[in-house]
Amino acid sequence: MSEAVSRADANQGEISVREPAGIIWTSLGLVTPLGARVSGGVPKGGATGISIDTRTLQAGELFFAIHGANSDGHDYVARAFEKGALAAVVDEAHAGALTGLGPLYVVRDVLASLERLGVAARARVKARVVAVTGSVGKTSTKEALRLALTQGGAVHASVASYNNHWGVPLTLARMPKETRFGVFEIGMNHAGEITPLSEMARPHVAIITTVAPVHIENFASVEAIADAKAEIFDGLEPGGVAILHRDNPHYQRLYARAKASPAGHVASFGDHESAEARLIRVRLFPDYSIIEAQICGRRLHYRLGAPGRHLAMNSLAVLLAAKAFGVDLDAAAGALAFFTAQPGRGQRLTLAAVDGPYALIDESYNANPASMRAAFELAGALPLPSPGRRIAVLGDMLELGVKGAAMHAELADDLRANHIDLVFAAGPLMKSLYDALPVSMQGAWRESASLLEPEVAAAVRAGDIVVVKGSNGSRMSVIVGALKQGGADGDAAQNGRTS
């Protein structure tokens, strides 16, 4: 799966979390930013939200008929009105056929009009904005920022991983006037994609979590990936803050780009002794982490509501952003106790095997060498009940280019170093890793996740820690779904919830 949300079909994504109650755009106020003419009369009132997906559209929302790679939003306009859409934004080519269904804002290009509305939304708010990018950890960092900044006022944040050419303007267009802090995730697959999104969001703080060989097939080198990530500084507001991972091998390159940008200050986080936010110690528990850190000379102890050293590390960037915005550090750190890893992104579930409960770590949404190593490190660091085993269920890492097979095989050493007992693998690239393992660690290899699923389901037993990870295109979520369907042990789960 690409780092940015799939560009396949804007009408088929997991869209819209409903906006807060109340009108965010008056009907007349939409005409100018959209660059539209109105057909069918100006609707009364205004839009309570923005939607590009009729499956989740709520009554009163404005529907944008975006043309996707696999389907056209104009085919869903009638359905949008059936569900109570205020109006629909459509292009000139389709307007005639859609006349009479309901109020239409007719424009030359629907996506361009969404971008215009996003720019207008950014211009009308006084919110302080933070944008986050990076090869790994964007979405979890965005969610942690949302929690921490809530301690200083109303926060508006990207939904899911809406971080691409339609996700960023959509998030902007949904931003209410009263927003105090805006949190935006920005992704890319190719050079040149982040600059226009950063210039649209105009962040006061820009974070790069890390740089790693992700989507390397689209780049000449990892240095080129670093340069593409550094495009986030192109839209930085004058005097803004750039936040970088001090331990990353490309720190100096990123630092030089940040200093050449409008940034007024470059802050860093990491283990490095010169980092402004330094991780001193992290203790991992099954459902949380206890962190000791030094933030700009202050010693802090706080709880993060999910286990993982990589999550603990990125929480330092979150606290640097909170400090830059004047949010109380103690309150911001305290809010991180309520952080929960999301499905496909490290969510931990307690499930029932035939002979008792076991732990599942769902990392099925995405994968690259850096995030694979972080997942192995987490599994290796968690306490293991006797007689449990550490099991890795792995799918192909995609978009790695000609070195893909070798990059898979190289993970064998990391599996051994983190005391993984058994490995199940799916996909042609993962065959290289599987073959590099000793027979004692080999569970099974199959061509696809669906073929591997029965092998995994039959193998798990009480006390195991099972981590499932792969690129979204490898469909490891099939295995997660099957294991979950096998039975959740509600009594064994932490307070009946997942984290």
Image: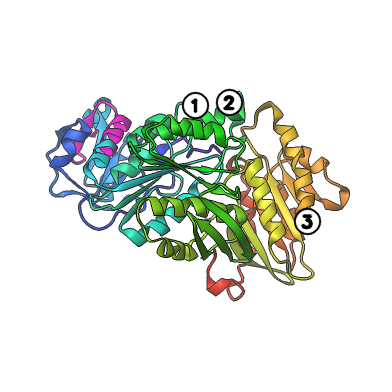
Q: Which of marks 2 and 3 is nearer the N terminus?
A: 2
The residue tagged 3 is: 419
Judge the density around disc 3: few (<14), some (14-19), many (≥20) Cα neighbours within 10 Å: some
**Is 139 positioned to the left or the right of 32 in the image?**
right
Say if 462 sits above or below 105 in the image.
Answer: below
Depth check: give the residue in front, 297 or 460.
Answer: 297
* Amino acid type indicated by mark 3: His
Residue at 74%, 56% (x, y): give it: 391
The residue tagged 2 is: 219
Q: Give the structural element (helix, strand or loop) at label 1.
A: loop
Depth check: give the residue in front, 30 or 51.
Answer: 30
Tell me which segment is drawn in magenta: 98-118
Label 2 to label 1: alpha-carbon separation: 8 Å
Q: Is residue 97 visible?
A: yes
Q: Do the residues labelled 2 and 1 touch (CB within 8 Å)?
A: yes
Decide whether residue 112 is among the magenta residues. yes
The residue tagged 1 is: 191
* Amino acid type indicated by mark 2: Phe
Depth check: give the residue in front, 292 or 157.
Answer: 292
Pick the quarter of the image with the N terminus.
top right
